[in-house]
Image (cartoon, rainbow, N blue to C red):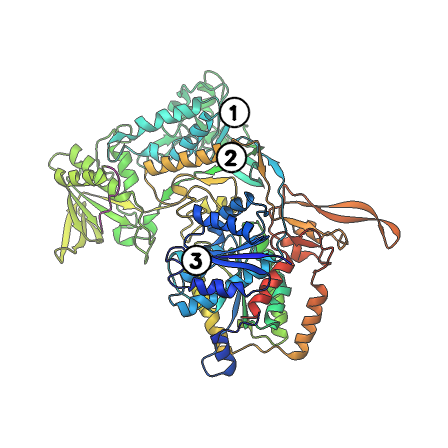
Amino acid sequence: MSVVNDTQAAASTGTETFEPKILAFACHWCTYSGADLAGLNRMSYPANVRVLRVPCSGRVNPQYILTALNKGVDGVLVCGCHPGDCHYVSGNYYAKRRLMAFRRMLQYTGLEPERFQVRWISGSEAGKFRDTVTSVVEQVRELGPYKPDPALAALIDSSVDASNPVLPEGGEA
Amino acid sequence: MSRVGVFVCHCGSNIAGTVDVEHVAEEAAKLPNVAYATTNKYMCSDPGQQAVREAIIEHNLDRIVIASCSPRMHEATFRKMLAGTDINPYMLEIANVREQCSWVHKDKDVGTPKAIDLVKMAVAKVNYDAPLTTTTIPVNKRALIIGGGIAGMQAALDIADAGYPVTIVEKESSLGGRMVMLDKTFPTMDCSACICTPKMTDVGAHPNITIKTLAEVESVGGYIGNFEVTVREKAKYVDYDTCTGCSLCETKCPSKVDSEFDQGLAKRRAIYRPFAQAVPAKPTIDAKNCRKLIDGKCGVCEKVCPVGSIKFDDEDKVTTEVYGAIIVAIGYQLIDWTKIYGEYGGGRFKDVISGLQFERLVNASGPTEGHILRPSDNTEPKTVVIVKCVGSRDPEKAKSYCSRACCMYAAKHAHQYLDKVKDARCYIFYMDIRTPGKGYDEFYMNTQHDGARYIRGRVSKIINQNGKLICKGEDTLLGSQVTVEADMVVLETAMVPADEANQIGSMLGITRDKDLWLSEAHPKLRPVETNSGGIYLAGTCQGPKDIPDSVAQASAAAMKVAILFSKDELESNAMIANSNKNLCNGCGACVAICPYGAITLEEITARENSVMVTREISKVNPGLCQGCGACTVACRPGAMDLRGFTDEQIMREVAALCQW
């Protein structure tokens, strides 16, 4: 699975402009449909973002964000329904509280705030999705590649692995 | 070892135009556990689906990835297809290479590598898919309709005729909504009341329909098939069981206030029916203006009522009932132009009126009995200016959208005015004429033949001078300034969502667009459903519409409800939370975070480390769980997981992405 594409090769050798990798968690009901609508309206935005669909922004475990940053992503975006609009009543409120505290913690460890952002984008806000993605890509491009502190990375790695519930008797799912 | 099949769709040129689909399939074939990868012109078509079925048998596949349009579009289609094979319908992942790849990137060099990454993520996830099963939940075959305008009434009649009980919750004291306020309807010039009031009577008399007037929905709980709805019926101060609707009380009441129904052009009493044909045909007391209820003096209505129906001690009635489906038909209101358009007098000039006021003015049962008279001095206006797009298509000051019905009713107003007033002149200031619809353009042309003069441009200012309204504007076709001395000005104002739209939207989990119109599930393919199962939209709450479109949408929503009610049970969501009892420590964090009350703690006794232990563990109710996954993140020991979106699957997707 070591298919390295041209952009990445160029980025790692530093011969061309740096192309950041952004992982965007999008809730199925609002932001994911907003992203679909951006496509339907043939808007265009940088290809640096990969959307990972989750049912609700409240499903996003901080552990995913740590792993992503630690394993080579330059920025993470979490998007959900606007406050008050959550398809699941209150998931985005939990996401907001949880991720805002988590964001402070990441900043404390030295992460630039632009690398981890939380945004509310509704299913009809295709333009906002495009603008958000574009601005996050630009901000992270300015910052350059993310290099996790090796000691911290090792710590995160061990803690994430320990809590990773990949257990043989892990229920039916 | 799983055997994954990857199927990449061309979607004609929709995907293949900016993504090298053959290359995507080649790269997919190299991924671990991928046993087969191919492309197809239209994966969702019958031949496309047949090709997948054949490949499953031929290559002994046990799970598949479809790289195509959004899962919101065809995930259900492919699940249904898998249901006809040996593979469980949930052993499927969709890579969204159309909406989120080929359509937003113009270049194959950009689109192709991204599509490969998206397929990689989907393959990483599908490897950890597990077969899922559903359970059944009961359907309560009773419908709730919020709003008793033409859309709500049509939906109620259709559902009731299909044999199911319906309850209408209407905030006003009568059914009818906006349509019953109109005089005539375009393009046939049917009398609005003549086609609306029989519907109201039908609704009122239908054995399957219950009407709750002066009522509002206070809270909604539950889910499709099982909504628990609390409705507050405000005190009417009249006993509807005994009242005969003789209206003697109305004639004797001494309090007079502006009539909402007549748009402030006439007065009504404090005990009143909004209009003569109201359904229910019984009065209510407006507590804010009733002398008896304010300071205890009066009570004339009580004295004259021949059957003793007046109840000054009446109280709000709050009831909670269970419904299987909800139709939202809360309609629209007109934009308050007085706050925005100071250049049109901002409401200071009595003879600058709104289109709805004109409807009342021209109506035979309106304040002037159908004679078109200036509100200021009751004289007949000889020159009328009609201004269109007041608030519509004006992003700087008001709304950016077109309100859709105004071009037609402006033409209707001009036609009615020129028909009723002899030697009259009518000028219509317009931006564009939009008359799509059966017989609509012909109607507009006829209005021009009637003598209405269309001037392309906006009115920039109205000055009140010696009883005349001087309208200054521009004729953009002639490129010159125009001044019209008018006796009366009619503003065709924008439709905006009802005041309750935001509150009802958030209570029912319906998304609103930037203007607060309620959003349908899909703008083209699911125009009456919302993203919340069992909740449907009808009429103008979803966006500006004219009457035929509102009625059509209402019947469509009613059909959706009838389809839902044709089943005794529904299949529950398979992608729900699941607790691993070996890991659960019974802390209850999941119980607190679940918005549906779907998780409970249950006592178990089991042998652990050779000792019999009794302890509490969490248990998920599959009928109540909606699969949001909030509990999974709250779970400290990592016992709670979400089927279909497990921690393992998301972590594998992240890992696949990190190799990009």
* Amino acid at circle 3: Glu
> Where residue B46 appears, x then y in whole percent?
44, 45
For the question of whether residue A96 can be seen, the reply is no
Residue located 32% across and 49% down the image: B338
Closer to the observer: label 2 or label 1? Answer: 2
* Between B372 and B53, the one nearer to me in the picture: B53
Task: Determine which residue is flagged by label 2.
Answer: B564
Q: Is residue B436 magenta?
A: yes
> For mark 2, does the 10 Å Cα neighbourhood hold few (<14), some (14 to 19), or many (20 or more) residues?
many
Give the quarter of the image for residue B259.
top left
Task: Determine which residue is flagged by label 1.
Answer: B311
* Amino acid at circle 1: Lys
Residue located 58% across and 78% down the image: A147
> For mark 3, does the 10 Å Cα neighbourhood hold few (<14), some (14 to 19), or many (20 or more) residues?
many
Residue located 42% across and 34% down the image: B152
* Between B502 and B408, the one nearer to me in the picture: B408
Give the distance between the C-alpha atoms of the residues marked 2 and 1, in whole angstroms: 41 Å
Q: Is residue A47 left or right of residue B459?
A: right
Chain ID, mark 1: B
* Amino acid at circle 2: Leu
> Where residue B83 appears, x then y in whole percent?
55, 43
